Image (cartoon, helix red, strand yellow):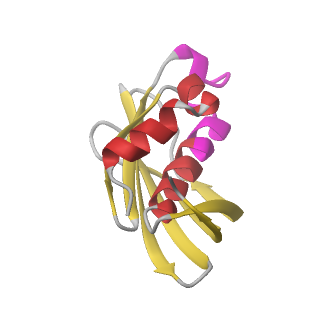
Amino acid sequence: MIDKKEADEILKNNGFVKLMGMELLEIREGFASGRIRLEEKHTNIYNGMHGGCSYALADTLAGIAASTYGNCVTTIDGKMNYLFPMKDTEYVYCETQAVRQGGRIGLYEARITDDNGKLLATAEFTYYRTSTKLD
């Protein structure tokens, strides 16, 4: 299993994660959480976080959770349910966890919240676990 230090090392080489300003908060087997400070560069025309940014946050963190089993993963499918605008909060938080991890295919769910813990969106992702081990 990869730990937070190893995951942080992987993420620091991910240009898109740097562009988003994502911070990894916690990682354990089948679980990852993180956040993004909501800044103007993340917003849509309504001054809320752009849906693509929140989707990328959830997909990235769910992918990290899926990789905690020691292999590289790739997204097969993803679905997001936007419940409330992501605005009027300093940070947008995301927690992801395994629903089921099989031999090659894993199903993960994500919950996106604001500073007060209000549920703003949910997501579900399917990952393919490759035979490539994480270094």
Q: Which of 3/75 is in front?
A: 3
Q: Which of 99/24 is in front?
A: 24
As drawn, which residue projects farthest toward the right? 76
As drawn, which residue projects farthest toward the front? 135
Residue 134 rendering spot, x and y as whole percentages:
52, 57
Is residue 35 in view?
A: yes
Q: Which of 123/96 is in front?
A: 96
Using the image, determine if residue 28 lies above or below residue 93.
below
Is residue 25 in view?
A: no
Location of residue 19 (image quadrant): top right
Q: Residue at image x 37%, y 30%?
A: 91
As drawn, which residue projects farthest toward the left? 116
Query: Per the image, is 65 magenta?
Result: no
Location of residue 107 (image quadrant): bottom right
Q: Residue at image x 40%, y 37%?
A: 35
Residue 36 rendering spot, x and y as whole percentages:
44, 31
Q: Residue at image x 47%, y 59%?
A: 110
Residue 128 rendering spot, x and y as whole percentages:
66, 70
Number of numbered discs visible in the structure rendering: 0
Q: Residue at image x 48%, y 81%?
A: 100
Using the image, determine if residue 18 lies above or below residue 102.
above
As drawn, which residue projects farthest toward the bottom? 102
Q: Quadrant of the N terminus?
A: bottom left
Q: Is residue 29 left or right of residue 44?
A: left
Residue 15 rendering spot, x and y as whole percentages:
62, 28
Region rendered in magenta: 40-56
